Image (cartoon, coloured by chain):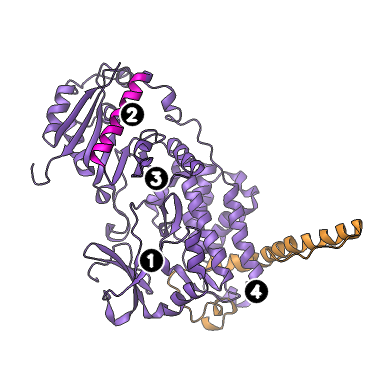
Chain colours: A purple, B orange
Amino acid sequence: MISGQLGSSFRDPNGFLFTRDGKLYRQINQGYSAEYCKLSETGLYASLLKAGLLIPHTEVDEPPAEPDIAFKIIKPERLAFISYPYEWSFSELKDAALATLSIQKRALKVGLSLKDASAYNIQFRNGKATLIDTLSFELYQQGEPWVAYKQFCQHFLAPLALMAKTDVHLSQLLRIYIDGVPLELASRLLPLITRLDLGLLTHIHLHAKAQAHYADKNLEPLQNSGRREMNKFAMQGLIDSLVNTIKKLEWKPAGTEWGKYYEITNYSKTAFNHKKELVSDWLARVAPNQVWDLGANNGEFTRLASNQGIVSIAFDIDPAAVEQNYRQMKTVGEQNILPLVLDLTNPSPALGWHNRERESLSLRAPADMVFALALIHHLAISNNVPLPQLADFFYDLGKWLVIEFVPRSDSQVQKLLANRLDIFDHYTREDFEEVFATRFYIRERTNLCESERYLYLMERRPLDVS
Amino acid sequence: MLIHSTPLLSLLEGKHLYLDPGTGSIFLQMTIASVLGLAVVIRTRWKQIKKIFINKASNSNGEEEGDD
């Protein structure tokens, strides 16, 4: 294993990512020199950059990580936050899919083609789905089929179809199937009526059958088939067909629990505005580089940070809220906010080869500042997480914490306790402050106007203090 | 049976296939290739055909149209 090589970058013989002294580099190996040069010579690099479809990089004089095979070292722009397809809402995955196809179309025009179509090659950068693997392009010869067609269907088309036609939560299959949803499984889970859609019929149902049929076969039938090659119109037709199939997939985020959250909350207008004021003041005081808003819902409070130019991630368990948030982000053209789906009681784990390809949430922490607004009672009461465990959890995630304590007397908590035994004797504000003070310095504490809720600004104690 | 003499896979001969493209996926592409290609060609030609009829009907000079 090469020193500094990323756990997620090892399969491609053409090159790999590595870090050195905290900086990120990509080594391009000798076998890829022609393709890399063609990327800039044809103007594809420039045009993709202009469209915000490819991550920019600079060529650097850095010593290679593996000098024997190195051609060049480039320094790609570093992303503020890495997210994964199983954390994306429906439209985020859809936009990532369409970005991939758009890139493929442009590449084909100049004699290049994507050699892979993994959803993990796409990241959100300044609000746009962007290709981060500069080495994804290969020389294309007329007549060749698309080698990444299967991967595209498994990583993008199958999960999108399942989210749109069966259940939006099926995006979580991407956590189990690290190379995309197997087409046979997708075909079985999709409603029969999807066979009437020509695109889904072809690219999922028939595709699944073709895969199964040839899984353990030798190549004789193909040898005798006498098929012509795949000309440029056929290739164009394939990409166009995939684009149209994906564009037709829609998901309306109605009917999940939190969709209409802010219409039925427990705040008077005064309390709500007071809360906003406090959060804004504390943001100005701490001036964080990055904010994680946990349980952000539709991002109302996240935007207090992102509108100030702070990179902000808005996490929520409800796909409808995240979807709403993302649609707003696109409509307005916001660049500093990234809505993501996350269950805080079961956050993204480390996945992939050696459990090192996809990072857990903890590994991507700490953020400069974490918001835990109108959240703690859901974790403490609904999920029975004791206060010390909560304190440990927030301690891992952020250096600063803006947290709202929601007391037992609050009507929302009373609702949560309605049908169960109240065993939460130790869930009081005094207990909360005592427990959190062991992990944090409590810098501010304010009672929200016209409310029993309290808002706190806390700073994490030094790491080696237990 | 010689793999390198297969018409289908000879297209991918000599390429460093880092990703397994899937035999079934290749087969499907080749099967639907003619249909997909035809659809694209018809879509392009349809506009040209329409233009011809419009020109004939209105008796005016047609515009040149490039490919998509």
The residue to which callout 1 is attached is: A57
Horizontal and vertical percent position of residue A396: 20, 43
The Cα–Cα distance between marks 3 and 4, rounded to whole angstroms, is: 46 Å
Query: Is disc 2 placed on a helix, strand or loop?
Result: helix
Magenta region includes residue A54: no
Which label is found at residue A276? 2
Picture quarter containing residue A282?
Answer: top left
The Cα–Cα distance between marks 1 and 4, rounded to whole angstroms, is: 42 Å
Query: Is disc 3 placed on a helix, strand or loop?
Result: strand
Q: In the image, is residue A330 above or below residue B57? A: above
Q: In the image, is residue A107 above or below residue A420? A: below
Horizontal and vertical percent position of residue B40: 69, 63
Which label is found at residue A227? 4
The Cα–Cα distance between marks 2 and 3, rounded to whole angstroms, is: 20 Å
Picture quarter containing residue A70?
Answer: bottom left
Which of marks 3 and 2 precedes in the sequence?
Answer: 2
On the picture, is B6 further left or further right than A77?
A: right
What's the amino acid at mark 4? Arg
In front: label 3 or label 1: 1
In front: label 2 or label 3: 2
What's the amino acid at mark 3? Leu
Q: Are marks 3 and 4 in contact (CB under 8 Å)?
A: no
Residue interval drawn in magenta:
A270-287
The chain carrying label 2 is A
What's the amino acid at mark 1? His
In front: label 1 or label 4: 1
The residue to which callout 3 is attached is: A338
